[in-house]
Image (cartoon, rainbow, N blue to C red):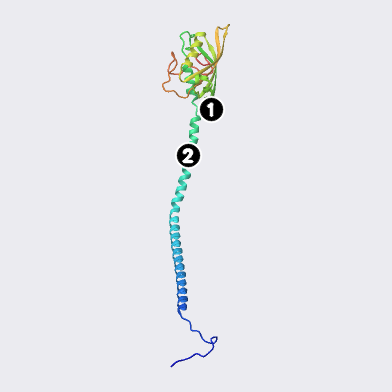
């Protein structure tokens, strides 16, 4: 049996193939699958990061006690360093004046020609003292003072010598010593008394290994004081 469609072309129903429907459904399914994959992948990554953050927070909380202890120890170390620095400053600024004065007195040569009751041919009338800073010591040494030695303490000496020979021995004793240096300023002869008055500045190096007292001197401090008497210091 043959069927003929006698309707005009404009009224005829067109029958198209169904493959495009299948393609549309497949595309929609693919897009939905990709979206679902991205969603669950992002969700899984977020959950993993959240678990990692929680684990890190737990570790931080457990380390808080150790962090606090470390900070306390750091503070104690800083305080100890400050105490050590203060102690070092005090040790550097500490001056053993009695030992230094005894060293100066012991450096004065003894004399066999001294008057009875005195072991010295030089009598000191006054002794002035000054503690030099490292900068002052360096400047003095560079300028040639004290034979270029770095003096820590400076003594301003004024006194009398029995004669010219004793005055020369006095100067030589400090010039030849590795622990001392001397800047001799002036001297004059007192005609009435027959003695030489003089003034000089003596620089004392803080410590010199093997330093020896002047020839003719003893190892102990002489009798008398640094401000009076008929001994090495008056």
Residues at marks 1 and 2 touching, judged by CB atoms closer than 8 Å = no
Count of all numbered marks drawn on residues in the image: 2
Q: How far apart are labels 1 and 2 at the CA level?
A: 25 Å
Q: Nearer the viewer, residue 135 or 219?
A: 135
**Residue shown at 44% from the left, 52% from the top:** 65
Q: In this rendering, is residue 62 above or below 225?
A: below
- In depth, the one of 75 and 3 nearer the eye is 3
In which quadrant will I find the N terminus? bottom left
Establish if 98 lies above or below 198.
Answer: below
Q: From this viewpoint, which residue is outermost toward the left?
A: 210
Regarding residue 131, the answer to whether it shows in the image is no
* Picture coordinates of residue 82, whole percent (x, y): 49, 39
- Decide if residue 19 is in sight here: yes
Residue 176: x %, y % from top left: 46, 16
Mark 2 is surrounded, within 10 Å at the Cα level, by few (under 14), some (14 to 19) or many (20 or more) other residues, namely: few
Residue 103 locus on image (x, y percent): 47, 20
Front position among marks 1 and 2: 1
Q: Secondary structure at mark 2?
A: helix
Between 29 and 100, which is closer to the camera in this rendering? 29
Picture coordinates of residue 85, whole percent (x, y): 49, 36
**Mark identifier at residue 15:** none
Upstream in sequence: badge 1 or badge 2: 2
Q: Which residue is mark 2?
A: 81
**In the displayed structure, does residue 11 sit left or right of residue 44?**
right
209 to 73, vertically: above or below: above
Residue shown at 53% from the left, 27% from the top: 135
Circle 1 Cα neighbour tier, 10 Å, few/some/many (<14 / 14–19 / ≥20): few
Residue to which mark 1 is pinned: 135
């Amino acid at each position: 049996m043959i069927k003929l469609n006698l309707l005009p072309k404009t009224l005829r129903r067109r029958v198209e193939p169904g493959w495009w429907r299948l393609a549309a459904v497949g595309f929609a399914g693919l897009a939905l699958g990709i979206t679902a994959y991205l969603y669950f992948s992002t969700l899984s990554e977020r959950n993993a990061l959240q678990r990692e953050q929680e684990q890190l927070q737990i570790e931080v909380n457990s380390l808080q006690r150790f962090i606090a202890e470390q900070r306390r120890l750091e503070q104690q170390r800083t305080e100890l360093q400050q105490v050590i620095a203060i102690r070092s400053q005090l040790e550097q600024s500490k001056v053993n004046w009695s030992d230094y004065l005894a060293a100066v007195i012991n450096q004065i040569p003894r004399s066999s020609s001294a008057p009875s009751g005195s072991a010295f041919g030089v009598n000191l009338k006054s002794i002035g003292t000054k503690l030099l800073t490292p900068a002052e010591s360096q400047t003095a040494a560079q300028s040639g003072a004290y034979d270029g030695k770095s003096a820590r303490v400076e003594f301003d000496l004024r006194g009398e010598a029995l004669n010219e020979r004793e005055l020369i021995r006095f100067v030589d004793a400090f010039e030849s010593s590795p622990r001392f240096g001397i800047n001799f300023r002036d001297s004059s002869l007192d005609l009435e008394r027959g003695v030489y008055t003089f003034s000089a500045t003596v620089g004392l190096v803080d410590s010199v290994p093997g330093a020896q007292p002047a020839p003719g001197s003893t190892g102990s401090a002489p009798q008398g004081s640094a401000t009076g008497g008929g001994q090495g210091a008056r």
